[in-house]
Image (cartoon, rainbow, N blue to C red):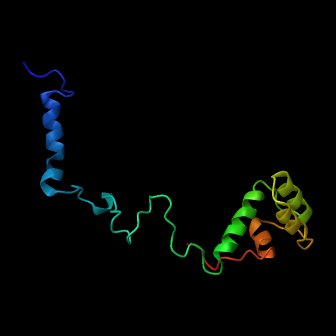
């Protein structure tokens, strides 16, 4: 009497064996089109792009320092949800409502009085640097 712990019957076992036979004999993927094969991680210039905690070398884009990137990021998080175009006073009030540090609120209040249409204009005026190109 056969063991009753099998998950498949003999017909399904034979079908699965047939499907995996090419991978076993060829020792790799059996796709006819190479674009269907997964890209190997170990040949990705020595680092695993899916692992967390690995910093990219030269993480700051050309034209910006790492400090510029950090300051710009912090200011962008404070200004999430602002309705543009906005004046310096509107930006400062929004930042204060978001719990921004006094230094950030003061920097926004000191911006030249004009209408800012997006965060890039604000960051440029605050001299947080400007990307020469994107990755």
Q: Position of residue 74 (x, y in %)?
A: 72, 62
Q: Residue at x 19, y 23 (%)?
A: 5
* Residue sitting nearer the eye, 4 or 99: 99
Is the N terminus in the top left, top right, bottom left or bottom right quadrant?
Answer: top left
**Relative to 49, does residue 9 appear above or below in the rendering?**
above
**Relative to 33, does residue 112 appear above or below in the rendering?**
below
Is the C terminus in the top left, top right, bottom left or bottom right quadrant?
Answer: bottom right
Relative side of 78 to 17, left or right: right
Q: Position of residue 3 (x, y in %)?
A: 12, 22
Relative side of 61 to 1, left or right: right
Q: Residue at x 18, y 26 (%)?
A: 6
| Picture quadrant of residue 39 | bottom left
**Relative to 117, does residue 97 appear above or below in the rendering?**
above
Q: Residue at x 49, y 58 (%)?
A: 52
Relative side of 124 to 24, left or right: right
Q: Position of residue 17 (x, y in %)?
A: 14, 41
Relative side of 111 to 67, left or right: right
Q: Position of residue 20 (x, y in %)?
A: 18, 46
């Amino acid at each position: 009497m056969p063991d009753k712990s099998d998950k498949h019957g003999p017909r399904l076992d034979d079908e699965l064996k047939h499907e995996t036979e090419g991978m076993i004999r060829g020792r790799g993927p059996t796709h006819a089109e190479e674009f269907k094969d997964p890209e190997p991680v170990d040949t990705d210039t020595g680092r695993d792009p899916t692992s967390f905690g690995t910093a990219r070398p030269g993480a700051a884009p050309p034209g910006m320092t790492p400090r510029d990137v950090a300051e710009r990021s912090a200011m962008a998080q404070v200004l999430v949800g602002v309705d543009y175009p906005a004046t310096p006073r509107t930006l400062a009030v929004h930042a204060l409502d978001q719990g921004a540090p006094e230094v950030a609120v003061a920097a926004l209040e000191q911006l030249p009085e004009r209408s800012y249409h997006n965060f890039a204009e604000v960051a440029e005026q605050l001299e947080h640097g400007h990307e020469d190109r994107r990755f």
